[in-house]
Image: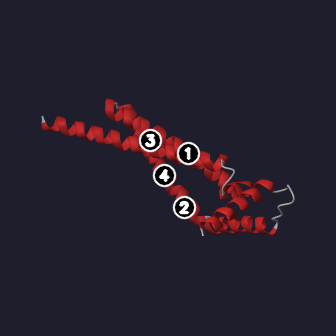
């Protein structure tokens, strides 16, 4: 009798844990989409000049989508005790762990080139800033927006 109640508690804790995975996956997916579509923040300046940011946003979208699917499969598998869905849940969990390890190693190995690329993009934007031409109008408008907000905070 006591083991049945304990299994029920474990089942619902697993459901809540997977619901949290689903919500966090939606947040990661939202950040990836935000990076792609945002045109008024500093990310827009980097987005036009850096291909790494676009690739990173696609990676965030993919990881968010996989995490959402994993959370959904875990929720359904936990509540209905479906072994196939719980097996898929474990497979997705292992896939995310491997992806996180690979991303960490990749970022660690590319940190100097990312820093150099970011610095060169910002330096080029500052050197070529001209509010009278329309060549980099969106980047310059974003830079003006950033400058205005930074000076307003002080």
Q: Dot 2: few (<14), some (14–19), or many (≥20) neighbours within 10 Å? A: few
- Where residue 30 is drawn, which disc sits there? 1
Separation of marks 3 and 4 at Cα, in angstroms: 19 Å
- Where residue 22 is drawn, which disc sits there? 3
Marks 2 & 4, CB-CB < 8 Å contact:
no
Separation of marks 4 and 1 at Cα, in angstroms: 22 Å
For marks 1 and 3, the one nearer the N-term is 3
Marks 3 & 4, CB-CB < 8 Å contact:
no
Instruction: Name the spot of residue 107 as percent of width and height, x first.
Output: 58, 61
Helix, strand or loop under label 2 = helix
Q: At 48% across and 43% down in the image, what residue appears? A: 67
Of all residues, the one furthest to the left in this rendering is: 1
Q: At 26% across and 41% down in the image, what residue appears? A: 10
For marks 3 and 4, the one nearer the N-term is 3
Helix, strand or loop under label 3 = helix
Separation of marks 2 and 4 at Cα, in angstroms: 11 Å
Q: In this figure, which residue is indicated by the disc labeled 2?
A: 105
Q: In this figure, which residue is indicated by the disc labeled 4?
A: 98
Instruction: Name the spot of residue 65 as percent of width and height, x first.
Output: 53, 41
Q: At 34% across and 30% down in the image, what residue appears? A: 82
Residue 140 placement, left or right of 3: right
Front disc: 4 or 1: 1
Q: Dot 1: few (<14), some (14–19), or many (≥20) neighbours within 10 Å? A: some
Instruction: Name the spot of residue 40 as percent of width and height, x first.
Output: 68, 53
For marks 4 and 1, the one nearer the N-term is 1
Separation of marks 2 and 3 at Cα, in angstroms: 25 Å
Front disc: 3 or 4: 3
Helix, strand or loop under label 1 = helix
For marks 2 and 4, the one nearer the N-term is 4
């Amino acid at each position: 009798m006591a083991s049945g109640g304990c299994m029920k508690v474990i089942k619902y804790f697993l459901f809540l844990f997977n619901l949290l995975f689903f919500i966090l996956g939606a947040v990661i997916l939202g950040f990836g989409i935000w990076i792609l579509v945002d045109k008024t923040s500093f990310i827009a300046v980097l987005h036009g000049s850096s291909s790494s940011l676009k690739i990173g946003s696609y990676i965030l979208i993919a990881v968010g989508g996989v995490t959402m699917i994993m959370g959904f499969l875990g929720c359904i598998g936990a509540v209905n005790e479906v072994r196939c869905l719980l097996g898929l849940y474990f497979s997705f969990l292992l896939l995310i762990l491997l992806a996180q390890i690979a991303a960490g190693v990749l970022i660690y190995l590319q940190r100097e080139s990312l820093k150099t690329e970011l610095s060169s993009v910002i330096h080029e934007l500052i050197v070529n800033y001209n509010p009278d031409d329309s060549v980099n109008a969106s980047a310059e408008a974003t830079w003006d927006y950033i400058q205005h907000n930074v000076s307003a905070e002080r």
